Image: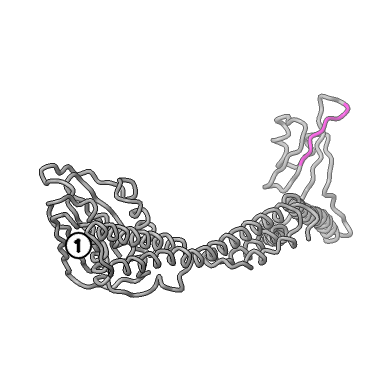
């Protein structure tokens, strides 16, 4: 449970990290200053001890140019301005000051020979300082990582919980895995509660869908089965030619309704007990579709040519494939005009083509069409969805002369 919001925790973490680093750097610089002071004093004392008992003075004052060290006289004659000057070659530091007579200047000379470190020693100190700075930088980075991890830990925890949930296989208990109550009332808690409620609604929807499809599968198919059974009994009785045509129309309408119900139920099912990985042959399903839809050619002088190059097998849902083929064959039979060339069904290793003529070759002007939107039946949109569900591809090409439907796997 967290008392502060995520924004405040991140701000506090950043402030703590900066404060700790500032304190560490402050102590480091303070230590460096004290070390430098002690070092200068130690070198100065050591130099004096080496010249004992005649002690030398590192600091000396001069009020005349002629009394300055010889190396500084030429420079002093240039009448330098007040200030501090450094002469590396002579190892001297000079301060120029005004005396009571403003026209005259006095010189304070500090001889640092033996007090300042040698160049080689400076490089060693630079290396030590670089190492200390690098170490502090690494420690600061590590501290920042630790502090920020603790600040965003609830976000990472929620992400891990959500990642463990498979959206393709949601169960009624998945939303309980979020356990939003443990995330408090901050932004992460709001997000966790929203995800939990969303998953709960999705799980309830999936359960309702499964219940509906299982119930509808029985409730919708039973009346159709009863109608088909009653029609079979009627066909066995003595019927006039007019009554027999009416019975045939009812039977065809019932078969169409059965195919439509199976289509929608097949699309509505979230899972289908592994039937999407079943291997089946193409030719028997194509022959079955032709037999079921052949009544649409009654009264038309149209033949059906089947070009069977091979008899391939397909991996997927056999009922979905049968529904798709039935839809394509039905559309081809319905839209083929009387006296046109035969409807051609071609089966290859990875493709199925259904071609039907809708006009003469003389009127042919290529105009490709979109499958679901050109009046070839609502079923083509369903065919497209069935193909997407099974990993197949579907396309439709139509012009003034013919329509070519292609189903590939």
Does residue 30 show up magenta in the picture? no
Query: Could you tell whether 100 is left or right of 383 in the image?
Result: right
Q: Position of residue 170 (x, y in %)?
A: 56, 66
Query: Could you tell whether 202 is left or right of 41 in the image?
Result: left
Does residue 96 show up magenta in the picture? yes
- According to the picture, the residue beneath numbered tag 1 turns out to be 345
Q: 307 or 164: nearer the eye?
A: 307
Name above or below for residue 129 compared with residue 91: below
In the image, what residue occupies the spot 72% across and 58% down?
Answer: 151
Q: How is the image coloured?
A: one colour
Q: 195 or 130: nearer the eye?
A: 195
**Residue that extends furthest to the bottom in the rendered view of this protein:** 279
Residue 26 visible to an observer of this rendering = yes
Q: 214 or 245: nearer the eye?
A: 245
**Residue that extends furthest to the left in the rendered view of this protein:** 362
Density class for disc 1 (Cα within 10 Å; few <14, some 14-19, many ≥20) is many
Residue 32 visible to an observer of this rendering = no
Q: Position of residue 2 (x, y in %)?
A: 78, 58
Q: Position of residue 141 (x, y in %)?
A: 68, 59
- Tally of numbered tags: 1
- Magenta stretch in the rendered image: 94-100
Q: Position of residue 246 (x, y in %)?
A: 28, 57
Query: Could you tell whether 249 is left or right of 270 in the image?
Result: left
Q: Main secondary structure of the magenta part?
A: strand
């Amino acid at each position: 449970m967290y008392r502060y919001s995520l924004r405040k925790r991140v701000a506090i973490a950043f402030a703590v990290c900066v404060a700790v680093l500032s304190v560490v750097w402050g102590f480091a610089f303070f230590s460096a200053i004290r070390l430098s002071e002690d070092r200068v004093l130690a070198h100065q004392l050591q130099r004096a001890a080496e010249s004992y008992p005649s002690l030398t003075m590192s600091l000396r004052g001069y009020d005349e140019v002629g009394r300055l060290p010889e190396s500084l006289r030429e420079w002093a004659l240039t009448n330098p301005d007040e200030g501090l000057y450094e002469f590396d070659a002579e190892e001297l530091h000079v301060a120029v000051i005004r005396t009571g007579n403003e026209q005259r200047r006095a010189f304070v000379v500090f001889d640092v020979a033996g007090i300042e470190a040698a160049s080689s020693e400076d490089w060693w100190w630079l290396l030590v300082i670089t190492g200390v700075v690098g170490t502090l930088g690494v420690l600061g980075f590590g501290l920042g990582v630790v502090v920020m991890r603790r600040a965003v830990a609830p976000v990472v925890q929620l992400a891990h919980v959500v990642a463990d949930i498979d959206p393709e296989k949601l169960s009624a208990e998945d939303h309980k895995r979020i356990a939003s109550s443990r995330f408090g009332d901050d932004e992460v808690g709001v997000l966790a509660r929203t995800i939990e409620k969303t998953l709960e609604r999705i799980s309830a929807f999936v359960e309702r869908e499964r219940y509906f499809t299982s119930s509808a599968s029985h409730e919708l198919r039973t009346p159709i089965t009863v109608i088909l059974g009653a029609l079979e009994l009627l066909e066995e009785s003595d019927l006039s030619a007019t009554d027999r045509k009416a019975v045939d129309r009812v039977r065809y309408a019932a078969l169409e309704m059965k195919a439509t119900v199976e289509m929608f139920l097949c699309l509505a099912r979230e899972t289908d007990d592994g039937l999407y990985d079943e291997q089946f042959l193409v030719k028997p399903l194509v022959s079955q579709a032709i037999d079921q839809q052949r009544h649409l050619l009654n009264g038309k002088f149209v033949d059906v040519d089947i070009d069977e190059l091979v008899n391939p097998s397909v991996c997927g849902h056999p009922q979905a494939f049968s529904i798709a083929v039935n839809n394509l064959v039905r559309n081809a039979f319905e839209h083929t005009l009387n006296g046109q060339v035969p409807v051609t069904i071609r089966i290859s290793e990875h493709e199925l083509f259904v071609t039907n003529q809708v006009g003469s070759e003389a009127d042919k002007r290529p105009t490709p069409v979109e499958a679901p939107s050109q009046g070839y039946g609502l079923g083509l949109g369903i065919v497209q969805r069935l193909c997407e569900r099974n990993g197949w591809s579907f396309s439709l090409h139509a012009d003034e002369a013919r329509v070519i439907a292609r189903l590939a796997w």
